[in-house]
Image: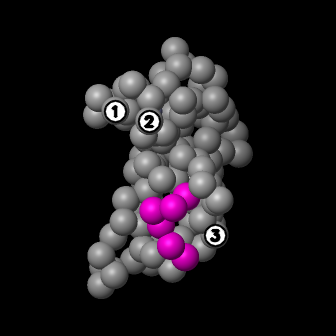
Amino acid sequence: MKPGTLLGHEGIGVVEAPGGQVRNFDIGGRVMVCSTVSCGVCSCCRAGDTAQCDSANPNGPSAGTSFFGGPETTEPMNGPQAQRAGIPFASNTLVRLPEQSATTRRSCSATP
Ligand SMILES: [Zn+2]
Protein backbone atom coordinates (compact mmCIF):
# COMPACT_ATOMS: atom_id res chain seq x y z
CA MET A 1 0.00 0.00 0.00
CA LYS A 2 1.31 3.42 -0.91
CA PRO A 3 1.80 5.67 2.18
CA GLY A 4 -0.91 8.29 2.42
CA THR A 5 -3.63 6.21 0.80
CA LEU A 6 -6.95 6.53 2.64
CA LEU A 7 -8.12 3.21 4.09
CA GLY A 8 -11.33 1.32 3.56
CA HIS A 9 -12.76 -0.95 0.90
CA GLU A 10 -16.51 -0.51 1.34
CA GLY A 11 -18.59 2.31 2.73
CA ILE A 12 -22.03 3.79 3.12
CA GLY A 13 -23.04 7.37 2.65
CA VAL A 14 -25.29 9.96 1.10
CA VAL A 15 -24.93 11.23 -2.46
CA GLU A 16 -23.92 14.85 -2.32
CA ALA A 17 -22.87 15.77 -5.85
CA PRO A 18 -23.57 13.26 -8.61
CA GLY A 19 -21.42 13.74 -11.71
CA GLY A 20 -22.97 14.78 -14.99
CA GLN A 21 -23.17 11.24 -16.36
CA VAL A 22 -24.65 9.75 -13.18
CA ARG A 23 -28.37 9.44 -13.80
CA ASN A 24 -29.37 6.65 -11.45
CA PHE A 25 -28.64 8.39 -8.14
CA ASP A 26 -30.07 11.61 -6.76
CA ILE A 27 -28.69 14.08 -4.26
CA GLY A 28 -29.55 12.88 -0.76
CA GLY A 29 -29.91 9.23 -1.74
CA ARG A 30 -28.42 6.68 0.64
CA VAL A 31 -25.87 4.40 -0.96
CA MET A 32 -23.41 1.63 -0.30
CA VAL A 33 -19.99 1.85 -1.95
CA CYS A 34 -18.89 -1.50 -3.36
CA SER A 35 -15.31 -2.49 -2.66
CA THR A 36 -14.48 -2.99 -6.32
CA VAL A 37 -14.81 -0.32 -8.96
CA SER A 38 -16.51 -1.33 -12.20
CA CYS A 39 -17.81 0.43 -15.27
CA GLY A 40 -20.86 -1.72 -15.87
CA VAL A 41 -20.51 -1.70 -19.65
CA CYS A 42 -17.34 -3.63 -20.61
CA SER A 43 -17.59 -7.30 -21.58
CA CYS A 44 -16.47 -8.48 -18.11
CA CYS A 45 -19.05 -6.31 -16.35
CA ARG A 46 -21.82 -7.36 -18.72
CA ALA A 47 -20.93 -10.99 -17.97
CA GLY A 48 -21.32 -10.27 -14.24
CA ASP A 49 -17.60 -10.42 -13.51
CA THR A 50 -17.30 -6.82 -12.34
CA ALA A 51 -14.10 -7.52 -10.36
CA GLN A 52 -12.35 -8.03 -13.70
CA CYS A 53 -13.63 -4.78 -15.24
CA ASP A 54 -11.58 -3.77 -18.27
CA SER A 55 -12.08 -0.04 -17.68
CA ALA A 56 -11.85 0.66 -13.95
CA ASN A 57 -8.15 0.13 -13.30
CA PRO A 58 -6.24 3.23 -14.43
CA ASN A 59 -3.25 0.98 -15.15
CA GLY A 60 -5.11 -0.94 -17.83
CA PRO A 61 -7.23 -4.07 -18.13
CA SER A 62 -4.38 -6.46 -17.34
CA ALA A 63 -3.54 -4.65 -14.05
CA GLY A 64 -6.22 -6.56 -12.16
CA THR A 65 -9.12 -5.65 -9.92
CA SER A 66 -9.46 -2.00 -8.99
CA PHE A 67 -10.66 -1.51 -5.45
CA PHE A 68 -10.78 1.27 -2.88
CA GLY A 69 -7.88 1.37 -0.45
CA GLY A 70 -6.04 -1.10 -2.62
CA PRO A 71 -2.41 -1.59 -3.55
CA GLU A 72 -0.32 0.67 -5.72
CA THR A 73 -1.32 -1.28 -8.83
CA THR A 74 -4.76 0.31 -8.51
CA GLU A 75 -3.06 3.74 -8.79
CA PRO A 76 -3.79 3.59 -5.64
CA MET A 77 -7.42 4.53 -5.21
CA ASN A 78 -8.28 6.15 -1.86
CA GLY A 79 -10.65 4.22 0.38
CA PRO A 80 -13.94 5.70 1.62
CA GLN A 81 -12.94 6.10 5.30
CA ALA A 82 -13.32 9.86 5.06
CA GLN A 83 -16.01 12.49 5.46
CA ARG A 84 -16.27 12.73 1.67
CA ALA A 85 -15.23 10.33 -1.06
CA GLY A 86 -15.14 10.59 -4.84
CA ILE A 87 -16.58 7.44 -6.37
CA PRO A 88 -15.42 6.64 -9.92
CA PHE A 89 -17.89 4.87 -12.20
CA ALA A 90 -20.54 5.68 -9.59
CA SER A 91 -23.43 4.45 -11.72
CA ASN A 92 -22.17 0.89 -11.29
CA THR A 93 -20.00 1.14 -8.16
CA LEU A 94 -22.76 2.43 -5.87
CA VAL A 95 -25.78 0.45 -4.68
CA ARG A 96 -28.96 2.25 -3.60
CA LEU A 97 -30.00 1.69 0.03
CA PRO A 98 -33.56 1.91 1.33
CA GLU A 99 -34.45 5.36 2.69
CA GLN A 100 -35.11 3.98 6.17
CA SER A 101 -31.73 2.25 6.41
CA ALA A 102 -29.37 3.38 9.13
CA THR A 103 -26.26 5.12 7.86
CA THR A 104 -23.61 7.25 9.38
CA ARG A 105 -23.43 10.68 7.84
CA ARG A 106 -20.85 10.54 5.08
CA SER A 107 -21.05 12.13 1.71
CA CYS A 108 -20.24 10.71 -1.68
CA SER A 109 -19.31 12.69 -4.73
CA ALA A 110 -20.46 10.35 -7.44
CA THR A 111 -18.43 10.64 -10.61
CA PRO A 112 -19.02 8.98 -13.97
ZN1 LIG B 1 -16.35 -2.88 -16.70
Q: Residue at x 60, y 50 (%)?
A: 112
> Does the beta carbon at disc 3 come under 8 Å from ligand 1?
no
Are circles 2 and 1 on residues that touch, CB within 8 Å?
Answer: yes
- Which of the two marks, 1 or 3, is nearer to us in this view? 1
| Majority SS type along the magenta span | loop
Specify the label residue 46 is tagged with: 1
> Which amino acid is tagged 3?
Ala
Is 69 situated above or below 51?
Answer: below
Instruction: Please name the residue that numbered disc 2 is placed on.
Output: 41
The crowding category of the residue bearing disc 1, from other C-alpha atoms within 10 Å (few below 14, some 14 to 19, many at least 20), is: few
Q: Quadrant of residue 45?
A: top left
Q: Residue at x 63, y 29 (%)?
A: 58
Residue range of the region highlighted in magenta in the rendering: 22-27
Query: Residue 21, position in %: x, y?
Result: 60, 55
Label 2, label 3: how many angstroms apart (C-alpha)? 22 Å
Answer with left or right where residue 17 lies relative to residue 54. right
> Which amino acid is tagged 1?
Arg
Label 1, label 3: how many angstroms apart (C-alpha)? 26 Å
Q: Nearer the viewer, residue 43 or 57?
A: 43
Query: Residue 90, position in %: x, y?
Result: 52, 53
Residue that extends furthest to the top in the rendered view of this protein: 62
> Does the beta carbon at disc 2 come under 8 Å from ligand 1?
yes
Instruction: Please name the residue that numbered disc 3 is placed on.
Output: 17
Answer with left or right where residue 9 lies relative to residue 83. left
The earlier-in-sequence mark between 1 and 3 is 3
